[in-house]
Image (cartoon, rainbow, N blue to C red):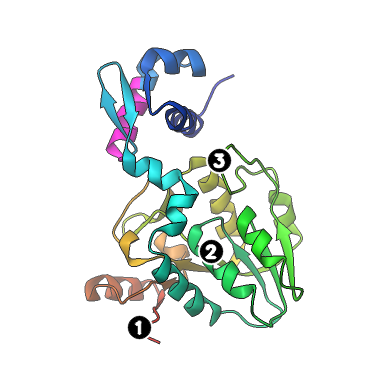
Amino acid sequence: MKMFASERRNKIMHLLHDKQRITVKELAKKTGVSEATLRSDLTRMEKDGLLTRTHGGAILNEYADNETSFSVREKRNKKEKSEIAREAFGFITEKQCILLDASSTALELARYLKHQPIRLTVVTSGLQSALELKENPDITVIMIGGVVTNGSTSIEGKLGLDILDYVNIDIMFTSASGFSLEKGLTDFNLYEVELKKEMVKRSRKVVAVIDSSKIGVNSSAVFAKVGQIDTLITDKPIESDIAEELSSYNIYLASPIMS
């Protein structure tokens, strides 16, 4: 069966996470794809900073490995993410239906909501977020169905998208591996990106919750263009020239320091 480029590259990353290094010949056997095509994929993925080409194969970049390890991402910039979560809570009102992606920043928002006396419906693709939110009796939690891969804490793929046809999403809170004016919101996991694209389309308002370390960074694939974002919440004010350009897109900027 023919594999799309995004499927091939995600498969390559899964194999690299298992072995840390792999040859083109091994990849060809595992994927059934020609070595020429795989070499092209590896070149593209090296440009994206996901791996390093070696003679006859590739090794996993330490940065890319960290990006896909949720336990590592969860600990990174934790204080900033907690501050962003508290700021994001100010955009939520009683009886709304909100959507949380499977990001570590969205998990911080879920942990904050867990202790708030507010009636909400929360739709999420994050397994850990759902487990946190179920502890609040005032919150109705709806999980998006799909595939859970080994080592993942998120739902991947589009199998459960039909559930979004039965709910009206007031606000989607989403994070990303990177945000830039040129690309918008970008993420590493290509399967998650496909799901998040659909989430964005089906939400009335999109609030990006991004710690400042990700501003100006581009990851593998775009899931929301700048024009699709309504609000950007970060842990500290961003550079004035970027702020001015975002304002031209009618994107509202917020941070705990500005509040």
Distance, label 2 to label 1, CA atoms, is 20 Å
Which quadrant of the structure image shows residue 247?
Answer: bottom left
Q: Nearer the viewer, residue 198 or 8?
A: 8
Q: Which amino acid does label 1 sit on?
A: Ile
Question: Would you name the residue on which mark 3 appears?
Answer: 151
Q: Residue 231, relative to residue 196: is it above or below? A: below
Give residue 80's position: percent from left, percent from top: 39, 70
Q: Distance between the residues labelled 3 and 2?
A: 18 Å
Residue 106 position within the rendered picture, expressed as x and y whole percent measured from the top left: 53, 64
- Lower sequence index among marks 2 and 1: 2
Image coordinates for residue 99, horizontal then vertical, percent: 62, 64
Q: Callout 2, which amino acid?
A: Ala
Q: How far apart are marks 3 and 1 (CA)?
A: 35 Å
Q: Which residue lies furthest to the bottom in this view?
A: 259
Point out which mark residue 106 bears: 2
Dot 1: what SS? loop
User: Is residue 224 shown to the viewer in this render?
Assistant: no
Q: Can residue 160 be seen in this view?
A: yes
Magenta stretch: give its range: 39-49
Nearer-N-terminus badge (3/2):
2
User: In this orientation, which residue lies closer to the viewer: 60 or 39?
Assistant: 60
Residue 257 numbered mark, or none:
1
From the viewer's perspective, is the residue at label 3 or at label 1 nearer?
A: 3
Question: In which quadrant of the rendered image does the C terminus lie?
Answer: bottom left
Q: Which of the numbered marks, if any, corresponds to residue 51?
A: none
